[in-house]
Structures are given as structure tokens and as C-alpha cells.
Image (tube, rainbow, N blue to C red):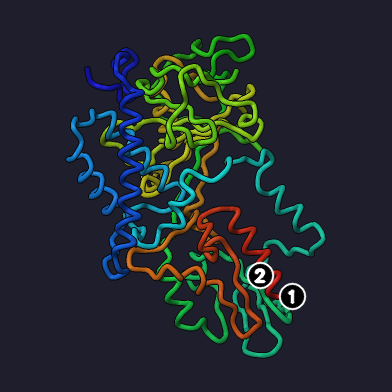
Amino acid sequence: MEPHSGTSADTATTVDSGGVIRRVEFITEAVLDALADWRERSHQSQDVSLEAKLQELHRGLQALAPLPLPPLGDSLFAAHLTRLEMVMGAPLSQVSAFACDAILAQSPPRGPSVCLVPGLGALTQALSRPLEVHQDTEVTMIDYSQEEVQVQTAKGCIYTADKVLVTVPTSVLKAGGLQFKPALPAFKQSALEDIVEGRLEKVVLEFPWKFWGQRVGGKDSSESEQGDRKPDEVQMQDSEGELDIGDERAVSKVWKDVGEGDEVFSGGAKRGERVSEQKRKLGGQWLWRLQPSGQPRGLFSRFFDPYPEGGTVLVGEVSGAACCALDPLSDGQALGLCVQALREAFPGKVPQPTRGYVTRWGGECWGGAVGCALRPGADPQVPVSLAQPLEGRLFFAGEATVPWLPASATAACVSGLREAVRMTN
């Protein structure tokens, strides 16, 4: 019997999914070890994309395996690749295999992943409280040719300062909307060209009850008063029980609750194990969907439950090249696509959502990207070059300038502290 791929509720309940998971994890760890060995033996001139190298090593190790993996194994390995793309914030086909060691070192991440319930805005507001922040003020020119730096805005205002810190995303610097006088030196321009920006979009859905939990508010999560109507489009609205992960059949149903997002990549949960109280307090649970073959990798392969204690919100994620599937869709169509993915995983259980929201970060002129990595052939010292100050007056911060914590909010914060020390010395 073929393993369940997310299209039927009554197939593959007898698959030894636990054994397949362990084999895939063993092969994946072996692939990453082989990648580390290859980097030690190779030169930068031999660099290729991380996608190509991982697939090459995976095929080689599979050929040595005594038994071939079933299709479920391919889906699980694809989930590992999706996980890496989300950590890197960029498609693996565009990422350097030679210069990715810092990113791979944090996959699985060291320590728990946490979610700020009020959002990152609460953190930035707290940090900026003693400062005078001018919002809706576009900076068009930074003149650091004189002893005093001049910052010019689109409204014609000019601010002067002894030192200036630039924290705009690399995608904005590359677009050229922010001019520098004199122009950024060649080593900075070259470093920027070696950066590949990532994509990540989120689709937030609120439901009348928590169909993916056991019981919510006295209602059995399997009840569906509205049925599985075809989710061609979900109407937009304006809007400002602990999961048991011990049932191995969960994998056959294409779901695996991985707590903070790491168990499925480091051994999985043991039978009967539940998500710990500590993890639930840290904020949220990650749910993985093993995608059917033929779907773009990263298309709603991961969902986030920010309120595991009883909320009814799920956040679907689309990463890497799969974001192109959302770009031409209306918000209602994108929400419908997300609901369709959920109904493949929970046949007959998903009600019509009450409201939803779709991010469009890829189209933001002040961002345009989420995370970044190095292109194949790039010098691993690119982040150091990006961080290098100019003339002792112009400084640079941002997650792209931290080589040991790339593509993370932590790196953004750490880089700001680093430059604060530099600027005061």
C-alpha cells in the first residue's frame, strides 16, 4: 500500500512511518556530514548550489542503502530541504554550498524558537522609546564626503550628524533608491551582488473552532458544521488541548507536530510523548505537512499555531520559489489555496475560516525580501565586507552583516549592538 500523500483519509495507516522517518533522518544527517567533508576538501572555485550538492549526495547515499525508500521517504527528505530553505530565507538552488556552514550549524536551531505574542513591533517600540523616530520619511541620499554626514530625505529635509548607521535591507541597497556620495566602494558593491535575498509569505486563517486539536471549548475538533466546500476563494474581512504527537499514524496523515520545529529533524517524538509545558509557554507549535509530489516545495508545507492553549488561528507559510505561486493570486484566492492544503491533510474536518490575512512582503519597496544567503561562488567573508565602516563616519548593520547568525532576527539585533559599540569608540 502506498504511503499517504495528503489526498485521502483512509490510506496507508499500516505504513511503518516511524521506521521511514528514522531512515530518512539517518540519511539526511549523513548527507550533511558528507557536505561538511566536501567543503573541507574543496576550493571555493568548485562551488555549486546547495540544492545540487545535497541532491547529488542524497542520490549517492541512497544507492548504498540496502533497501530503497518508499515515496514517503522522498516527501520527508523534501521536508528537510524545505526546513533548510526557511532557515536560510532563500531557495537552495541559489545558495552557495561552499559558504553555507554558518547556516547549517543552526539547523536544527540551538535552543528553542520563540514567538513574540504582540509581534516584533513591541520589541522595536521598547528599544526606540527614548529616541525621536521620524516615520514616513524616505531617505534618498547620504553624503559622507565631508566631516559631517548629511542625510537628505524625499521631502527635501537635510539632517546632519557626526556618524550615520545604515540598516536598510540589502535588496533596497541593490535597487539603488538610496544614493551615496561618494558612491559605495567596489568591495561593498561586489558584496551586495553576492547576496541572494529570500522570500517568505504567510497566510493567517482564523477558524470557528480548532479542528487540528483534540477538543476546544467542549466541541470535538472533528466536527465540521460547514463541510468541505470547495475553497476557490475565501472572503476577506477587516481585522486589526495540547496535541498528542505519539500516534505514528500522524505521519501517514501527512502531519507531524514538531513542537518548536525541530523534533522531526532530530529523531522525532517517542510514542505517547506530548509537547512539553515549557515549549508551549515559549509560544506556539509548528505543524508540518508532507507535500504531495508535484507541488512546489515550500507551498504550505509548514503551519504555525500561535495559541496552542485554545486559540483557533493557523499561520500557513510559503517559502522560496513557491512564493511565485501566490504573487498572481488575489488575497481571497491565496486564502483558498491555503484552506485547500489543510483539507488535503484533514479531510472532512476543516470548516470555512471566519477571516484571514495574506502578507505581501515580496512586493514591499522598503523590504522586498525575507532573509538572505550567499550565492554560489561567493566569498564567505561577504558579511564582514558588508559590515565594514566607511571613513569612520558611515556604519552598516543588519542580519546580512553577521556571518555566524545569518537570516535571523537575533542577528539584526546583535548587529545593532555591535555598531553601537563601534560608533562610540
Q: Earlier in the sequence, mark 2 or mark 1?
A: 2
Give the quarter of the figure containing the N terminus.
Answer: top left
Return the x and y of residue 340 as percentages of the image width and height.
39, 27
Amino acid of disc 2: Glu
- Left or right: residue 324 versus residue 352 is left
- Give the secondary structure at mark 2: helix
Nearer the observer, 137 or 267: 267
Return the x and y of residue 271 as percentages of the image width and height.
46, 18
Residue 19, image quadrant: top left
Mark number displayed over residue 103 = none
Amino acid of disc 1: Thr
Q: Please give the count of numbered marks on the rendered protein.
A: 2
Label 2 sits on residue:
419
Mark number displayed over residue 424 = 1
Q: From what the image shows, is residue 20 above or below residue 398?
A: above
Q: Is residue 333 visible?
A: no
**Residue occupying the point 52% across, 20% down:** 273
Q: Residue furthest right?
A: 130
Neighbourhood count class around disc 2 (C-alpha, 10 Å): few under 14, some 14–19, many 20 upward:
many
Q: Is residue 179 visible?
A: yes
**Residue occupying the point 60% across, 59% down:** 412
